[in-house]
Image (cartoon, helix red, strand yellow):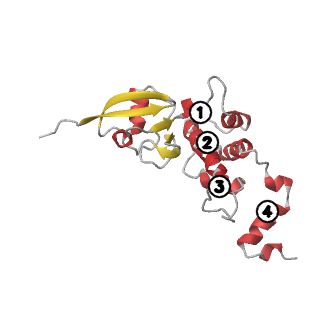
Amino acid sequence: MDSEPVHADVALTVNGTGHRLRVDTRSSLLDVLRERLGLTGSKKGCDHGQCGACTVLLDGRRANACLALAVAHDGAEIVTVEGLADGGRLSPLQEAFIENDAFQCGYCTPGQLCSATAVLEEARRGWPSAVTADVSRDPFLDDEEIRERMSGNLCRCGAYVGIVAAVRDAAGEPNRAARDPGAVAERIGSARGGEASRP
């Protein structure tokens, strides 16, 4: 015999607005955002946490909303793509995405924007990634760092070049390789124990 769904009360603060909801305990955060709160910016892509289209900021950290049960996040603060702009003014990152043509069909863009917002904050806090060469210093958001940090967000249109450029611009980091051609050899040399930098 099928059992009746179990419901629970949850309180969520979404883009600065408090909500009290009674939800099915099986409901994902993504479904609650889209179907109960009408915030359809976060997209359902793979529904398995592999594409990043549903990425939101959950208590300041990026999370795949399709994998998060809403009931497990009672009291959480959530920012979706709708909450990135300051009133009618786009965030610098959103403006950089437009200026760098960092999207094509746009389906993955909300997740890309939320993830990139977190990347900028992680770098500001000095958090290293798997490719950070020197963890004793704040990470430099060059293209390699950005690609690694954004690797959980897929773009099936292939707008990666524009996405990397947009994140770099929003970080205020010029393309180091263009400014300093020796930077590439320096990075390769450090990865190979100085071999590439030898005359």
Expressed as whole percent of the image width and height from the top left, the position of residue 142 reads: 72, 54
Residue beneath label 3, please? 126
Residue beneath label 2, please? 117
Mark 1 or mark 4: which comes first in sequence?
1
Of the residues tagged 4 and 3, which is closer to the observer?
A: 3
How dense is the environment of label 1, judged by Cα within 10 Å: few (below 14), some, or many (20 and up)? some
Mark 4 or mark 3: which comes first in sequence?
3
Of the residues tagged 1 and 4, which is closer to the observer?
A: 1
What is the C-alpha distance between the residues marked 4 and 2? 26 Å
Residue beneath label 1, please? 84
Camera sees residue 43: no
Residue 189 is left or right of residue 181, and the answer is: left
How dense is the environment of label 4, judged by Cα within 10 Å: few (below 14), some, or many (20 and up)? some
Secondary structure beneath dot 4 equals helix
Going 74% across and 71% down the picture, which residue do you hit?
A: 190
Mark 1 or mark 3: which comes first in sequence?
1
